[in-house]
Image: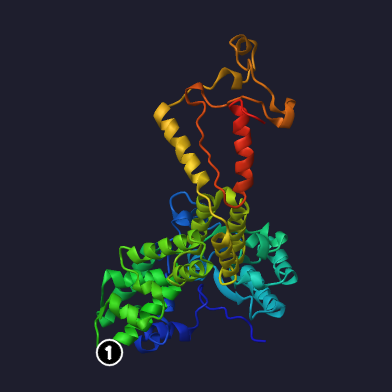
Amino acid sequence: MARPRTGSGTGDTLFAAAARRDPVRAGQVPLAERMRPKTLAELVGQTHLFGPNKLLAEAIASDHVPSMILWGPPGVGKTTLGRIIAEQTKAEFVPFSAVLGNLQDLRAIVQLAKERRELHAKRTLVFVDEIHRFNKAQQDAFLPHVENGTITLVGATTENPSFAVNAALLSRCKVFRLEALTEPDLVRLLRRALDDEAHGLGARHLAAEEDALVGIARAARGDGRRALSTLEALAEHMKAAGETTLTLALVARAEEHAPLLYDKAGEEHYNVVSAFIKSMRGSDPDAALYWMMRMLEAGDDPLFVLRRMLIFASEDVGNADPRALLVAVAADQSFRRMGMPEGLYPLAHAAVYLACAPKSNAVNAAWHRAQALVQQYGALPVPKKLRNAVTPLMKDEGYGAGYKYAHDFEGGVVRGETYLPDEIAGESLYEPTDRGEEVRIKARLDALRGRGKGGPP
């Protein structure tokens, strides 16, 4: 087996360096690779990690970088960050694939790392892409070398490390969460690529409409690599067509997906969201699924879709089917565990359930009525019978006087009792419908309110 290369701090070979200097050969390298940031200052996004007084930024600056797990979606800079850390700390960067590598390769890397440390006092940063693909035994093989400092491990994963990395290795690593790049971040990346003559597309002197770049950014779904790859493909298309300005119309023609047809103001986006909500409210699971997939295929964040369903479960289903909220919450939790594309199952599951569930907006109406009373009457005093008499003075003031303990009465209900402030006693805020589970709730509540008014039990 060939021994891992021991070139420069970034793991370059002479051929790779020459290719970057040669503009003809450099063109053979994908745009996303050519535009890979070389310093923290060039890195886009992740301000929560590299702002003032942030742990990771300070660790790099002080040259005290711990072994770590970089957790985040594709195309947000995990590999780039590993290379930057190695460069800024003057460590040897050794990439190691969890898909292609094996324990024999790891032993060779560790042996070279020992020699490098003993002979040259130089550290080795082993970057393990997709570390979640290693089994427990493979992950355990890193433990002694991480613990004794032979290597600094930087693992990259799109999966939750709590479930994807074994506890022993996780306890020896600091976890840093990388976020999906925002649309402004991606537009900034695209602009940089268009302007950069040395590594990007600047030599072609292409112009681009802002709407076109926003369309590409939206379609990329937070993935910088995807955004740059799309831009590169469009640039090649423009070259063949003899065009020099990237327009939204050109982007829309060149791409198969709907997101690029969204206008800058986002009107179509909100139209589709509205159609999704109204389809569920109208108990049409077929339309709900269609509009949901329109949103997801258009690049909307699945967590945004789940948030809309969480709201809908209370706003439009409510107590007509109390399980609806549980289904929506479970879908949200499941998606966060699964990610895409498997996460489409709980998304579809929840959308169909909510569409088919009986509907009630009684909870929605109830809290709005309560809010209106608070705004109308202000902070009404709590009736003394409902106050706790925790001191003798409070008891002397009448706190708790007249309070009747409901469990002491038949059916756990006090006949004729009211718990609202005196000024609004008799107000009915929650009015159940005659749909779904609220049929039963309504019957019980009507009986209880009959007792409260002195009527029959």
Identify the residue shown where x is 61% and y is 77%.
97
Q: Which residue is mark 1?
A: 241
Can you tell which quarter of the image residue 268 is in? bottom left
Residue type at tag 1: Ala
Can you tell which quarter of the image residue 222 is in? bottom left
From what the image shows, is residue 407 above or below residue 7?
above
Q: Specify the quadrant that holds the N terminus.
A: bottom right
Q: What is the residue that sits farthest to the front in this orientation?
A: 456
Can you tell which quarter of the image residue 206 is in? bottom left
Whole-percent x and y of residue 435?
57, 51
Identify the residue shown where x is 47% and y is 35%.
370
**Residue sitting nearer the eye, 199 or 175:** 175
Marks counted in the figure total 1
Identify the residue shown where x is 63% and y is 33%.
448
**Residue sitting nearer the eye, 303 or 75:** 303
From what the image shows, is residue 321 above or below residue 416?
below
Identify the residue shown where x is 58% and y is 74%.
94
51 on left or right of 148: left
Count residues near mark 1 (Cα–Cα under 10 Å), then give few for <14, some for 14-19, many for 20+: few
Question: Is residue 35 at least partly visible in the picture?
Answer: no
Whole-percent x and y of residue 67?
61, 61
**Residue sitting nearer the eye, 374 or 74:** 374
Whole-percent x and y of residue 135?
72, 71
Give the structural element (helix, strand or loop) at label 1.
helix
Q: Specify the quadrant that holds the C terminus.
A: top right
Whole-percent x and y of residue 215?
35, 71
From what the image shows, is residue 126 above or below residue 105?
above
**Residue sitting nearer the eye, 414 or 180:** 414
